[in-house]
Image (cartoon, rainbow, N blue to C red):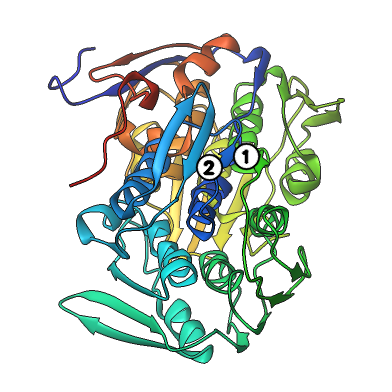
Amino acid sequence: MTPRSDDDAALILHGGTPLTGRTRIQSAKNSALYLILASLLTDEPLQLRDVPKLSDVLVGLEILEHVGVDVRWDGSDLHLHAAEVHRSDAPFRLVRKMRASFVAMGALLGRAGHARIGVPGGCAFGPRPVDRHIAAFEALGVHIDEVDGDFVAEARGPLEGHVRFPAPTVGGTQNVLLASALGSRRVVIENAALEPEVADLVDLLNAMGARIRGAGTSVLTVEGADRLHGTTFTPIADRIEAGTFLLATAATRGRTELRNVRLDHLGAVVATLEATGVLIHPTDDGVLVDAAGPLHAVDVEATPYPGFPTDLQAPFGAYLATLPGTARVRDAVYPDRFTHVPELRKMGARLDLDGRTLHVDGGALHAADVHAADIRAGGALVVAALAAEGSSRIGGVEFLDRGYERLDARLTDLGAHLERTGAPAADPTDRPYLPTP
């Protein structure tokens, strides 16, 4: 198979081979995206080690450069220095690429006291409104207007008060943390998101001199610091990528060793995989996975952490499509997150989407030409294509580049047969970073 155009990158996966061998899981993309924003809260250098070089991270760095942050890579280490912040806006042309960019509002409020952010974009599944972010800021005394499609926020004094989210929101919690860590009075966040990425941000901010209590609980208390300083910090391991590799091993009936895995962040995933018959054993820095024995289907429902993660709902559905038996898949976080279903059907998956419940009748899959519509749908298609007989072509690789660093090389480490066609994945160390005009 050949790419449809010079710019139309694709993965060609020759499936049907069990994954075997060792590979290392990257640091968490969903943590790094917010850790880099913390650089705005100090005029001293911040070094983040082992940062994944993903297109989403590059978008975040574009926003930082746009407001005046000096950005430099040294291998996989990222050096950020916001000695001066010349602007306090993130225009639509940048934030339209990634919904997480809206959290720049909190960091800019914390540093400059005002911010102008375009309406964010991102993946194409279901509504993910920012109204909870806006309501939280207003509860703390921030005045927000909508001007020409942008949100314009102004802190009219130190932030202070209580925020209670009607439902946990990772981005909303992180937005308030970034806004209040520097220069606020007492801020209490109730019904805060419990995800490890939130605790990772708290750990970084505290290492910079912030005073935040309650990490890992539903109530966070911030006593604003007068000044934050630079530090060196390593993000946590990426639990979603780890889960995707666990599922790829299971779908191919393989045996792998995954390094840099935090099993304490994967409790629901491990329990559900073990319920299907997969054997999972901890090692000093990761996990051994053995899916060579008999397997069977189980139901799964994605719920907020510590429940089964919504970001693995699609890849788990792809795994279920390879198993004997029937199962149901539901997503209580993003109930419409099923863009992968029509593509999996092209591969022979017997799937029936009844309202917001996916019914899976598992069996053998075959190769097909498919296209990813979002990051985790892409992960699902990779899981399915690795298990399917024949050579599959996966388009929409730009979505995979947002969530999985050097995916083709690391799958090759595990014995997968694949190649990438069209434009290669960008490596930000191949070119200098220049401020966005």
Q: Is residue 139 above or below residue 171?
A: below
Residue extending furthest toward the left: 5
Q: Disc 1 marks which amino acid? A: Asp
Q: Quadrant of the N terminus?
A: top left
Q: Mark 1 falls on what kind of element?
A: loop
In the displayed structure image, the side of residue 175 where residue 235 appears, left or right: right
Q: Position of residue 122 (x, y in %)?
A: 33, 54
Total numbered labels: 2
In the displayed structure image, the side of residue 95 where residue 414 appears, left or right: right
Give the residue at x 44% y 53%: 352
Residue denoted by label 1: 238
CA gap between label 1 and label 2 equals 7 Å
Q: Residues within 10 Å of mark 1 (few under 14, many from 20)?
A: many
Give the residue at x 52% y 38%: 318
Of residues 84 and 426, which is closer to you in this image? 84
Mark 2 and mark 1 in contact (Cβ < 8 Å)? yes
Q: Is residue 397 above or below residue 333?
A: above
Q: Position of residue 205 (x, y in %)?
A: 66, 58
Q: Which mark is residue 29?
A: 2
Asked if one can make out residue 371 in the rendered structure from this viewpoint, the answer is no
Q: Earlier in the sequence, mark 1 or mark 2?
A: 2
Q: Position of residue 292 (x, y in %)?
A: 74, 19
Of residues 59 and 261, which is closer to you in this image? 59
Q: Mark 2 falls on what kind of element?
A: helix
Q: Is residue 362 above or below residue 282?
A: below
